[in-house]
């Protein structure tokens, strides 16, 4: 799994990371793109779209404002979109991770 932010620079770094893994015969099951709350730049979107052919999935994780303020990130309830993203990552990677319940909307 490769994780990056939703910026042009981070997408370029993800491209380098995927190339390093695949050039050694490895596979990247997931590229997790973590939102910073701003729209994804077109350059980042284009770079990540090109990576879709080299990775199993590109999954976008939404911005979760509560994580910025929390002393204990595990105590922050995740919104449904984030839970869906985590479930997709778990399925693609073949492992389950403990996650919190969704916050009430």
Image: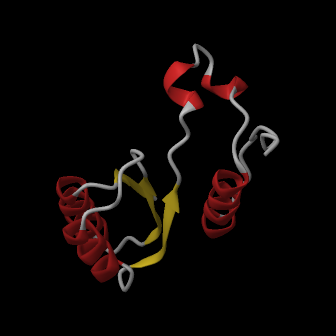
In the displayed structure, would residue 41 be above or below residue 79?
Answer: below
Q: Tell me if 83 is positioned left or right of 56 in this view.
A: right
State the residue at coordinates (33%, 55%). 6
State the residue at coordinates (29%, 67%). 18
In the displayed structure, would residue 104 be above or below residue 21?
Answer: above
The colour scheme used here is secondary structure
Kindly give the residue lying farthest to the bottom in the view shown.
Answer: 53
User: Does the image show residue 23?
Assistant: no
Quarter-of-image position of residue 10: bottom left
x%, y% of residue 82? 64, 52
**Nearer to us in this view, 39 or 57:** 39
- For the image, the number of numbered tags is 0
State the residue at coordinates (25%, 63%). 41
**Nearer to us in this view, 51 or 63:** 63
**Nearer to us in this view, 63 or 99:** 63
x%, y% of residue 98? 75, 40
């Amino acid at each position: 799994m490769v994780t990056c932010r939703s910026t042009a620079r981070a997408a370029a770094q993800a491209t380098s990371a995927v190339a390093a893994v695949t050039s050694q015969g490895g596979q990247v099951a997931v590229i997790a793109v973590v939102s910073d709350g701003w729209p994804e730049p077109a350059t980042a979107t284009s770079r990540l779209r090109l990576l879709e052919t080299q990775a199993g999935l590109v999954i976008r994780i939404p911005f979760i404002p509560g994580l910025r303020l929390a002393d204990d990130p595990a105590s922050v309830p995740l919104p449904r979109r984030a839970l869906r993203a985590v479930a997709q990552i778990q399925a693609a990677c073949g492992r389950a991770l403990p996650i919190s319940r969704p916050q009430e909307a």
